[in-house]
Image (cartoon, rainbow, N blue to C red):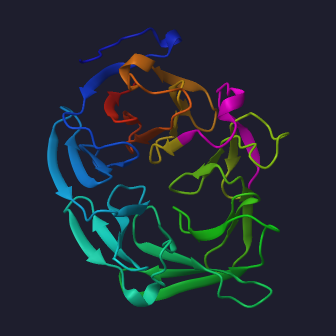
Amino acid sequence: MTHRLILLAALLPLLAAQPDVSVPPGANAKLAFSPDSRFLYAIGNSAMTYDFRTGRLLNRMTLKPGTETFSIASDGTTAILAERDSGVHVHLMFFDLGRRKLEPVPSAWYEPVYDGPDVALSADGRLFSVYSESGPSDRPMTVTVYDRSNGKILAKQTSEFISAGGAFGGGITPDGAVEFVNNRAGRKVVDLKTGRLIGRFSFASVRSPDGRWVVEFPNRTWNESASRDVIIKDGRDGAVIGKLALQVDDDETYGSIHGAFCGLSGRFIAGRGRAVTLYAIPSGAMIANLPVLSWQEHTAHVSDPVYVACSTTGTHTAVLSGNRLTLHDVP
């Protein structure tokens, strides 16, 4: 069914939602728009390409059973996939989304452990990083960054453990900084070349492709007294700028909200079981609220994850609720 809704500006207009896609990608697929916003990529059990205007499936590439998506460049050009062999190893692959081409990540760049290395891509896919704990005893957290154009190590930054416990990780940020991550303490972001501290951000946060803004979602998993606000910070120094006009219920304060920046358009989309909403950055004002019936799978519960993607122009969005994938135009 095609949802075409035109509301008054005061009622947060939403324009011309597209039909459901012709063939759903399966639950928990990773979503990304092509750089020109003409196509939507969904990577799950298969790598699928959809025409945004019609929702028609254009191409479906079967992946090996058990393949996982570790990272997608925010410009929608490249992903890192992990294939598992019959033993305890994983094999990393660069995946060109537009050409549907797989290329092995050089084996010398990572350890093929079963759980998979902690790897990331910069926004343009040019920089690749891998996290390890191979640094000196006083600074064991290590992020090594490779330039894919020449295969050389561009930088290696280390840090002391940023928490007394929990899970650790790190990698290149979309804008080319380095972050050290802990699921309890959050994200410590430093300069790629100098290691100078840029700022600290929460674990449940999303950084813009240029590093200008960070949106922090509430997460009371380790701190029951944490704020319920969705905070907007300056990505260059961690200063609080404001907050999104988003009312969060108690059961949504444990890291269950997903979000994405719409390129450098100054827009941000947030997805949760109760609502999918679009905001202006840095004001935090709501621009649009997608009607629930236009995207929610009929069997979904409000506690189920909702995954979202947004085009670089901020005018196209995609929503995955359960096994239902819908495409929407927004004003």
For the point 68% across and 58% down, the residue is: 236
Percent across and percent down for residue 216 are 67, 45
How many marks on residues?
Answer: 0
Predominant secondary structure, magenta span: loop
Residue 159's image quarter?
Answer: bottom right
Q: Looking at the figure, which quarter contains the N terminus?
A: top left
Closer to the camera, 210 or 28? Answer: 28
Q: Quadrant of the C terminus?
A: top left
Look at the image and say whether residue 192 sits in the magenta stretch: no
Q: Residue furthest front?
A: 86
Q: Measured from the top left, where is residue 221 in percent x and y?
A: 74, 46
Q: Is residue 291 visible?
A: no
Q: What residue sits 39% from the left and 67% below the top? A: 125
Please report the bounds of the magenta region as a residue range: 238-258
Which residue of the protein is positioned furthest toward the left in this rendering?
58
Q: Looking at the rendering, which quadrant does residue 136 occupy?
A: bottom right
Residue 286 in sight from this viewpoint: yes
Q: Horizontal and vertical percent for residue 79?
A: 36, 63
Give residue 32's position: percent from left, percent from top.
Answer: 36, 49
Q: Tell me: 8 left or right of 17.
A: right
Q: Which residue is at a point 63% across and 32% down the rendered structure image?
A: 284
Can you say whether 13 is above or below 201 in the image?
above
Is residue 52 found left or right of 235 in the rendered image? left
Residue 248 among those drawn in magenta: yes
Question: Seen in the image, is 79 located left or right of residue 186?
Answer: left
Q: Is residue 219 above or below residue 175?
A: above
Picture residue at 49% right of the left edge, 88% below the top: 153
In the displayed structure, 68 sits above or below 90; it is above
